[in-house]
Amino acid sequence: KELHIGEGMVGYLLGRHASTKQWIERVSGAYLVIKTRRLMIEIHGSKSDVERGELMIDILLRQKSCSPKLVDVPAMAARKDTRLIHMDELETHRILGVRGQTLRRLQMQNNVFMFFDTLSLMDRRQNTRTLILLTKRKRNMKRALDEVGKLTRIGRRVPQTKAAQT
């Protein structure tokens, strides 16, 4: 699969010493070839790995451009490799930490893509935020959910309805 990306986004997706690219590969299971001169990314792997890698890249680029809508939450909830956790404002701040450092640490330690979707109508009514976790491996998802539980009041209440793919 080939994706064309905007100028200035190549460096963002590569990251320092290709760290972002390597992280996307670990979490998605896909192999990325970034062609800097052509502003293009090739995504290789199984169908599900390529789809997961493409989704991660799309979300990262939307975050970078401050897009008001990151994902279709019901579509994400239907995926087998994701978990959605609704949390209140205090729990959200605990997960984010100072300038997002706790969230980044959780992502890197557990090889899980974690992000908060923009406020949906349901979230606004209930004064909650939705944390979305995405990964290829079940054990990574379990570790990440355990860490989220330790940082919040959610604890073992974390929904276990969707199993991550191995």
Image (tube, helix red, strand yellow):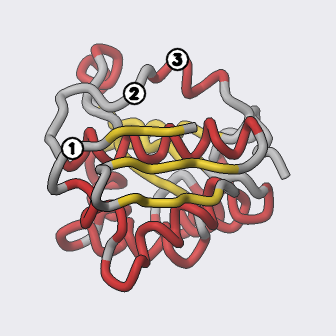
Compared across the picture, whether 85 is left or right of 46 comes to left
- According to the picture, the residue beneath numbered tag 3 turns out to be 74
Q: Nearer the viewer, residue 105 or 13?
A: 13
Earlier residue among tags 2 and 1: 1
Q: Amino acid at mark 1?
A: Gly
> In the rendering, which numbered label is found on residue 71?
2
Note whether 71 is above or below 26 in the view shown. above
Image vertical order of residue 69 relative to residue 5, above or below: above
Q: Amino acid at mark 2?
A: Val
Local packing at callout 3 (Cα closer than 10 Å; few below 14, some 14-19, many 20+) is: few
Is 138 placed left or right of 22 in the picture? Answer: right
**Which residue lies at the image location 59% right of the left edge and 63% below the top edge?**
25
C-alpha gap between disc 2 and disc 1 = 20 Å
Tell me the CA gap for discs 3 and 2: 9 Å
Q: Is residue 39 left or right of residue 57?
A: left
Q: What kind of residue is marked 3?
A: Pro
- Picture quadrant where residue 16 is located: bottom left
**For residue 6, which numbered disc appears in the image?**
1
Q: Are marks 2 and 1 in contact (CB under 8 Å)?
A: no
Task: Using a 10 Å C-alpha cutoff, classify the residue at mark 1 as few (fewer than 14 neighbours), some (14 to 19) or many (20 or more).
Answer: few
Q: What numbered label is drawn on residue 80?
A: none
46 relative to 62 in the view: left or right: right
The one of 79 and 36 positioned closer to us in this rendering: 36
